[in-house]
Amino acid sequence: MTGTEPRNRRHWVFDWRLMLFSGFFLPLVLGLGFWQLERGGEKQQLLEQWQQAAESRSWDDLESSGLEPGQPVVVSGLYSDYSWLLDNRTRDGVPGYEVLTLFYPDSGSPVLVNRGWIAGTRQRAELPVFPTPDSPVLLTARVSEYPVPPVLSDLDGDGQSGWPRRVQSLPAERARIQEPGLAAYILKLEDAGQPGAFRADWEPDMMGAQTHYGYALQWFSLATVLIVLTIIASYRKQES
């Protein structure tokens, strides 16, 4: 073995195809990362504004200014005797219902309140019995869409008499048969500690700021990987 034998060394080699690929995708990935940061900041500001409004403004004031899904609200009023049981809702493998009760605020439009999940009875023909507060209550909730299936609406429950009534979905037009003045959205109770609540363990109705920040981190990480791989791929082994 002598010192004159060839050794493998890495040298920078310009590859226009690699540079074109990286030059196209790197700004795109970075732009997506900064866009997610911007969206996260906007969402955080919006949530703070909503929270302040929920604590300081009445229901009719919030309603007149325009409601959006995910918006927190605080509303006082009375539950009615009219409830719909949203069928085919399970928790931990147990079949049951989500309870939607008509609610009359102190001011503003009546609104449906989703009070959470309850287990079904062993006999499907029997509906579960559940309590409803009969005195004024103060609710903390979030604005949500009416529960409508993605394809076809059912007609179950239209011919039922008495309350509660079992339904597979509850679009606004059906609920307004009972109360024509219903608000454009429903309310989901914030948690199981609210008056009249059952198991209220909802998935978030709106992407929060932290989710946007998480996506931004993923895009920036991808940009870092792209830079590192481009540098590594640009150094080729050459014999010397």
Image (cartoon, rainbow, N blue to C red):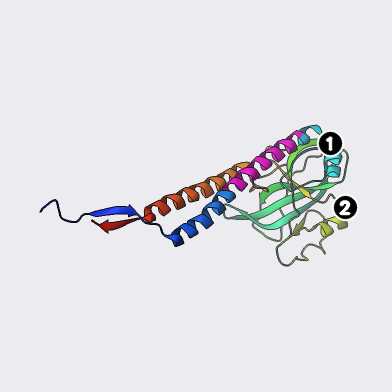
Magenta part, dominant SS: helix
Start-end of magenta stretch: 33-52
Which of the image's four quarters has the N terminus? Answer: bottom left
- What is the three-letter code of the residue carrying label 2? Glu
Residue plotted at (82% across, 40% down): 62
- What is the three-letter code of the residue carrying label 1? Ser
Q: Is label 1 or label 2 in front? A: 1
Relative height, residue 168 to residue 70 (above, below): below
Which sits earlier in the primary sequence, circle 1 or circle 2? 1
Where residue 192 sits in the image (x, y, percent)? 67, 40
Residue plotted at (83% across, 56% down): 175
Relative height, residue 82 to residue 193 (above, below): below
Badge 2, how many Cα within 10 Å: few under 14, some, many 20+? some
Relative height, residue 197 to residue 173 (above, below): above
In the image, 26: left or right of 4? right
Residue plotted at (74% across, 38% down): 50
Which residue matches tag 1?
58
Q: Is residue 191 visible?
A: no
In the image, 82: left or right of 198? right
Q: Is residue 67 visible?
A: yes
Which residue matches tag 2?
179
Where residue 109 sits in the image (x, y, percent)? 87, 45
Please state which of residues 186 and 198 is positioned toward the viewer in this rendering. 186
Is residue 131 one of those drawn in magenta?
no
Residue plotted at (67% across, 47% down): 206
Q: Residue furthest left?
A: 1
Q: CA distance from mark 1 to mark 2?
A: 21 Å
